Amino acid sequence: MTIKAKDFDHIVNKFGLRTRNSGDRLAWFECEGRIVTRTRRSNKKGGDLPFQHSIRQQLKLNDNEFRRAAACNLDRNQYVAILKQKGVL
């Protein structure tokens, strides 16, 4: 699966990840005051993002879940449920 920067930003907003711009766009998921997952995306202009498989793995999603997140079919509560099921939370 390929995603663009706008898809990444949509996932970040949908899951309520906190962000900070540095050389890259850093994003992290906090739950109960604890950082649970972290990821980043390149500030590369246009085209597909590099290291998309790493973004998916850092968010602790499998390929199907990542597709659902990019297609707006996965919200924050469902993401928390997935993380709990996988023992991350």
Image: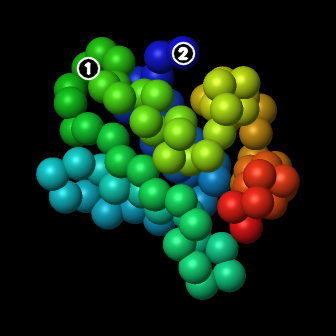
Give the residue displayed 77% in from the left and 52% down from the top: 86
| Amino acid type, mark 1 | Gly
Image position of 70 (left or right of 86): left
Q: Nearer the viewer, mark 1 or mark 2?
A: 2
The Cα atoms of the two marked residues, 1 and 2, are separated by 16 Å
Location of mark 1 (residue): 46
Q: Residue 46, percent across and down?
A: 26, 20
- Secondary structure state at the residue bearing disc 1: loop
Q: Residue 33, percent across and down?
A: 60, 84
Q: Does the rendering let one see residue 52?
A: yes
Image position of 79 (left or right of 9): right
- Between 33 and 9, the residue placed more toward the observer is 33
Residue that lies at the very extreme toward the front in this rendered image: 87
Give the residue displayed 42% in from the left and 28% down from the top: 52
Location of mark 2 (residue): 1
Residue 75 position (above or below residue 49): below
